[in-house]
């Protein structure tokens, strides 16, 4: 009898290598998705493979430290890491189902019977001690457990990719906040310089008015323009404060705890050399949202197998040994010892409509996952091409505004010199100064926009933190 049971066990174990349901096949992407980017023809970028630690291209130790702090202490990153641990625990639970399941039970019951229920001379009080050890092992004949482990493993990979996607966002937001604060400081300096220029112009105009060479209206107009430019400074200061407060939150700090070094920079960070962007193939291999979508598709494909396995009998081998004794003295004796050994078959048959409904749900989930994956691929390419175009055109705009600013500065200087000699009308001088103030502000804003476009491009290119979790 024992030999027959062992033979059946070995045969069932051999069958357990089979698993119902579809095997996962990585989804295909359009051939053009692997091609070089349309925007990579611009000289401001290169087709070299980008570095995951892209913020180091700014060569700013303060920024490096802030990014390091954000990756370690940002609350969104901490949530993502906790979700990885949750997925890891679920994987351990799935793997445990492939092992023998054991349990121990025990009870002690004290009872007292009515005098009417016992024979004369018998004890009315009894103590019943019961204990049992049981073990069971599911023969995974149709791969239910195997597919469950496969799904949990893919869920863990998806959680890890989700964490990388959070890191990409947090790093980009940290760099952007740092750039925003530094750019606002630079814009404040430009605005203050313009106010100083207009103050000098006001003194010249007022001196000429006192000598009867200008009208009172000329003085008022210069004063109005100066105050208008000065009014921009509080708004820029508020924007800088907001960027610094945002930077504190991103790095896991309160606003009071932000290090002074983060407040010092007064010029907009810039990457002066061509930015490496790679191509479509490496982008899709690097983008964590694309990889997470692919892993979720793998997980739900495996769950089709889990649901399909329920169409077939579930067979477990089990056994138990226990004892029941009246009182504690006889619990280890041979008399009250009991045991059992044998297979257990569980099968939902013939009504399997509920199981087939679950299979249909699982198949629909995979169709949704496939559409999500395709959307992630298209979105990754769209975001990258858009970021490349925005960066290229932001640089072109900045160059044009640099030329316009230089021309406006020359015109304003000539106007002031001619005003001192009485060779130009005050209104013409005022117009030249207004043009210069506008050109300075637009150029400073364009410098900020270039830096923002760089950050957006780096965000679109994704990141790589292999081995961080």
Image (cartoon, rainbow, N blue to C red):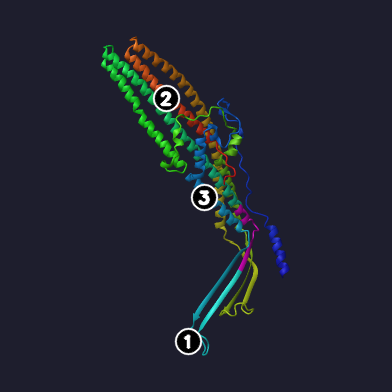
How packed is label 3: few (under 14 Cα within 10 Å), some, or many (20 or more)?
A: some
User: Among all residues in the image, which is located at the extreme bottom?
Assistant: 120
How packed is label 1: few (under 14 Cα within 10 Å), some, or many (20 or more)?
A: few
Residue drawn at point x = 54 percent, y = 57 percent: 354
Q: Is residue 174 magenta?
A: no
Residue at numbered disc 1: 115
Residue drawn at point x = 41 percent, y = 34 percent: 240
Residue 221 image offset from top left, x and y in percent: 30, 19
Q: Is residue 464 left or right of residue 246?
A: right
Q: Earlier in the sequence, mark 3 or mark 1?
A: 3
Residue 420 image offset from top left, x and y in percent: 34, 12
Disc 2 is placed on an element classified as: helix
Q: Is residue 466 left or right of residue 422?
A: right
Disc 3 is placed on an element classified as: helix
Q: Is residue 147 magenta?
A: yes
264 is higher (above) or lower (below) than 73: above
Q: Which residues are magenta?
A: 134-149
Residue at numbered disc 3: 82
Disc 1 is placed on an element classified as: helix
| Viewer-nearest residue: 186 or 275 | 186
Residue at numbered disc 2: 442
- Give the alpha-carbon distance from disc 2 to disc 3, as whole Å: 45 Å
Mark 2 in CB contact with mark 3 (< 8 angstroms):
no
Q: Is residue 360 left or right of residue 263?
A: right
Residue drawn at point x = 45 percent, y = 39 percent: 259
**Residue 382 appearing in the image:** no
86 is higher (above) or lower (below) than 103: above
Q: Earlier in the sequence, mark 2 or mark 1?
A: 1
**Residue 297 appearing in the image:** yes
| Viewer-nearest residue: 343 or 414 | 414
Q: Nearer the viewer, mark 3 or mark 1?
A: 3
């Amino acid at each position: 009898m024992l030999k027959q049971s062992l033979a059946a066990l070995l045969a069932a174990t051999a069958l357990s290598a089979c698993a119902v349901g579809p095997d996962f096949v990585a989804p295909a992407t359009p051939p053009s998705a692997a091609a070089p980017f349309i925007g990579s023809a611009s000289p401001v970028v290169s087709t070299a493979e980008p570095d995951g630690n892209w913020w180091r291209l700014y060569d700013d130790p303060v920024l490096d430290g802030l990014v390091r702090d954000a990756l370690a202490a940002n609350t969104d990153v901490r949530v993502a890491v906790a979700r990885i641990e949750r997925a890891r625990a679920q994987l351990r639970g799935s793997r445990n189902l492939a092992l023998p399941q054991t349990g121990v039970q025990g009870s002690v019951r004290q009872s007292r019977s009515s005098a009417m229920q016992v024979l004369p001379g018998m004890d009315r009080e009894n103590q019943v001690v019961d204990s049992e050890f049981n073990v069971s092992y599911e023969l995974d004949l149709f791969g239910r457990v195997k597919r469950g482990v496969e799904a949990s493993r893919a869920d863990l990979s998806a959680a890890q990719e989700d964490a990388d996607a959070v890191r990409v966002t947090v790093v980009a937001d940290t760099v952007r906040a740092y750039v925003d604060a530094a750019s606002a400081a630079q814009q404040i300096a430009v605005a203050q310089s313009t106010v100083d220029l207009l103050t000098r112009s006001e003194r010249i105009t007022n001196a000429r008015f006192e000598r009867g060479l200008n009208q009172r209206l000329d003085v008022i107009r210069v004063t109005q323009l100066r105050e208008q430019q000065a009014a921009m400074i509080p708004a820029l200061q508020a924007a800088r404060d907001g960027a610094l407060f945002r930077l504190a939150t991103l790095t896991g700090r309160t606003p009071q705890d932000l290090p002074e070094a983060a407040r010092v920079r007064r010029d907009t960070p810039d990457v002066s050399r061509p930015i490496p962007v790679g191509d479509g193939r490496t982008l899709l291999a690097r983008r964590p949202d694309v990889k997470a979508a692919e892993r979720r598709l793998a997980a739900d494909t495996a769950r089709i197998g889990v649901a399909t396995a329920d169409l077939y009998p579930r067979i477990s081998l089990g056994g138990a040994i226990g004892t029941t004794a009246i009182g504690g003295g006889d619990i280890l004796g041979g008399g009250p010892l009991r045991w059992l050994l044998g297979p257990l078959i569980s099968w939902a048959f013939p009504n399997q409509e509920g199981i087939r409904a679950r299979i249909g749900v699982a198949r629909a989930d995979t169709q949704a996952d496939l559409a999500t994956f395709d959307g992630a691929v298209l979105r990754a390419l769209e975001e990258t091409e858009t970021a490349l175009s925005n960066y290229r055109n932001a640089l072109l705009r900045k160059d044009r505004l640099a030329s316009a600013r230089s021309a406006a500065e020359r015109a304003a200087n000539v106007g002031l010199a001619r005003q001192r000699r009485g060779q130009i009308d005050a209104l013409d001088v005022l117009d030249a100064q207004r043009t210069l103030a506008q050109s300075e502000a637009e150029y400073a804003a364009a410098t900020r926009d270039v830096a923002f476009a760089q950050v957006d491009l780096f965000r679109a290119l994704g990141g790589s933190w292999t081995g961080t979790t």
